[in-house]
Image (cartoon, helix red, strand yellow):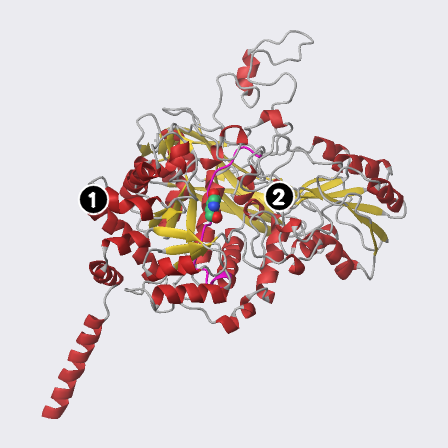
Amino acid sequence: MKRIMLSVAVAMLAAATCMWAQPTEDERVEELLRKMTLQEKIGQLNQLSVGGFDHNAAGMMRAGMVGSILNECNPNVLNRYQRAAVEDSRLGIPLLISRDVIHGFKTMFPIPLGLAATFDPELVQQGARFAAIEATASGIRWTFSPMLDIARDPRWGRIAEGSGEDTYLDTQMGVAMVKGYQGETFDQTSMAACVKHFVAYGAAEGGRDYNSTGVSERTLRNVYLPPFEACVEAGVMTLMTSFNDNDGIPSTGNGFLVNDVLRGEWGFEGFVVSDWASIYEMVNHGYAEDNKHAGELAFNAGVDMDMMSYAYIRHLEELINEGKVSMEDLDNAVRNILRVKFRLGLFENPYIDESNVEAAFYSEEALEAARKSAVESAVLLTNNGVLPLNRSKVKTVLVTGPMADAPHDQLGTWTFDGDPAHTVTPLKALKQLYGNDVQVIYEPGLKYSREFDKGGIAKAVKAAKKADVILAFLGEEAILSGEAHSLVDISLKGDQRKLLEALHETGKPVVLNIMAGRSLVLDFEIEHSDAILYSFHPGTMGGPAIAQLIFGDETPSGKTPVTFPKHVGQIPLYYNHNMTGRPANGREELLHEIPLKAGQTSLGMTSYWLDCPFAPEFPFGYGLTYTTFKYSAPEIEKTEYGVNDTVHACVTVRNTGDKEAIEVVQLYVRDLVGSVTRPVKELKGFKRVAIAPGETVKVAFELDIQDLAFYGKDMVKKVEPGKFQLWIAGDSASGTPIEFEVK
Ligand code: NOJ
């Protein structure tokens, strides 16, 4: 008995010791921090770009002068660098290896703007998971994604990299990507996400990349910041500051945003990295005297890691000695970075199995998710009934246009690692999937999107005469959008319009597919085609997705994540604008008050252009499919609510055509009177619903009154009681509102 008691006591002691022997993440951070020299601490804050194995860079790692690297993804090189940091440095702190994995690593998914058109966060999360599985197999444990910049200007090339113009949609997509990259639980396939660019970078004046912005604090809080806050709540591990100066303060030196809002108000516990050289660029902005001063401003603003300005590694020690930067803040920055490294398990598993890397690429499951994403991201903008093609009637198709067989360009911007050899183009897919039933003739007309005619158009026209239907693939090469690739003219480049016009003149039906990195001006294209399927840059599996949509084996369900302007001069044009005092439309009661003389067609002194309609070409949230839907008026269970109530709203949607299809049912709200002017409509919910022909489904939404809170005159976030309108519709420009009141 004594012996049993003794062994129980020993076991309990062992368990206690064992528990005691498992320090928490914070304890491990503190233990390590205690051992670090000042130089080693500063080293953790330094991020270095490397290309290939560089002995100097490896030397810095051995000396503990590098915390993270970017731009290298060769597993063997990465293991060598990691060995220098882990085995040859004094404290063996692993490197955090990063890369821009933006819409896939090897298997490329549609560009983020296309992903937003899916209105399918679950699918987007799944895509980000596959990106993480492929990238982490190569040793990448940190991606600079999602980009949460709201973009209301399609001239801005980076509109391709975000989720478009709407705060709610952007939030859903951003959170989905964070969850997908990081995984629901941390393991070896978890890749830290990085929300960027903090903040308002997408509001660049004139749509010119890197340009200044002038967004007020209220608009920041109501429009630009909520996606970041939601991702912080979802546990995003890192955040990147932006290049722009907003209202005169470069974001990388903006302590109000980083220290006060991000950490103070939202309790962010991850770390903040600058954008590439954006610390140094504060010198160019005329905000800092030199790189040392820029380092001081960035560090004291709360930026933990320096991406390629060398400001911290060169000047932080001096700044500490001069008392301009505190040791306490330095320790906190190091803590923030080490915490992420521990959470990712880098100390336990710093290396990758080089023999197993390729097995993770281009799996059947990833390719299928990419195909599905490309299907769901395609938006059917127009259709006179030509689509879907009838396989029993269409015997010959002409495939033409510079994007029909452009394996690199259909992958879109930020395609570092996706191998075009794996791309399935529309031409290839049409032949593979439908080649037995339908003869596919190929004549490109133009070789690339900016090309001017060198005789190819005549050849395409000649070939068109032999075809029943023309499938024209036009758009933008990958390099026409993305970082530093802004445009002033957002219509099709080169002689693409000439090609389209010539094809249209043949009298054959023209199905136009557009692959692009932004919303384009499409007035000419609408006139000269029978249908337009807009697939953004659809990624590796764009070809099968588009081919299946064209032949009706898949049904379009994408909706525009941005407003499509009629004319570039309308920009910025976005659905959730504030109401002017002289609205050009949408306020009939006002227009009725304006007496119109007989024969007068002008609306008078209202907010419109003389030479262009007020309305966009296609509104936000718009997209057709192969059937039609009829919406009932929305219903709510009562018309008065308290601030903590929930509105239960519903609508019935009937499929009035003869094809099953998915409809993205959208809920919008307007706050009729506020302490500041409010948007004419704001998206507050959406659901993808499959509806069979003839079927009527009831679609229900729950809207918390608290979701109507905003920063008003006093800059405090709250719901302002009063009247609201609510729509449930298939896009932002349709539907009849119902009214309710918050007491
Ligand atoms: C600059 C870009 O603005 C940023 O988004 C990107 O992550 C970094 N370069 C690193 O490549």
> Is the stretch drawn in magenta largely helix, strand or loop?
loop
Can you tell which quarter of the image residue 499 is in?
top right
Is residue 132 or residue 706 the one in the foreground?
Answer: 132
Is residue 298 or residue 126 the one in the foreground?
Answer: 298
Secondary element type, mark 1: helix
Query: For the point 33% across and 55% down, which residue is it?
Result: 65
Count of marks placed on residues: 2
Can you tell which quarter of the image residue 631 is in?
top right
The x, y position of residue 219, in whole percent, is 40, 30
Say which label, 1 or 2, has the lower sequence index. 1
Range covered by the magenta-colored residues = 135-154
The x, y position of residue 386, in whole percent, is 78, 44
Could you tell me the amino acid type at mark 2? Ile
Please, which residue is most extreme toward the left here?
2
Check the picture and name the quadrant holding the N terminus: bottom left
Secondary element type, mark 2: helix
Q: Which residue is mark 1?
A: 321
Is residue 8 or residue 225 the one in the foreground?
Answer: 225
Query: For the point 29% across and 51% down, which residue is it?
Result: 42
Q: Is residue 460 visible?
A: yes
Q: Is residue 1 visible?
A: no
For label 1, count other residues whose C-alpha is less than 10 Å away and answer few (under 14), some (14-19) or many (20+).
Answer: few
Please, which residue is most extreme toward the top here?
597
For label 2, count other residues whose C-alpha is less than 10 Å away and answer few (under 14), some (14-19) or many (20+).
Answer: some
Q: Which residue is mark 2?
A: 479
In magenta stretch: residue 139 = yes
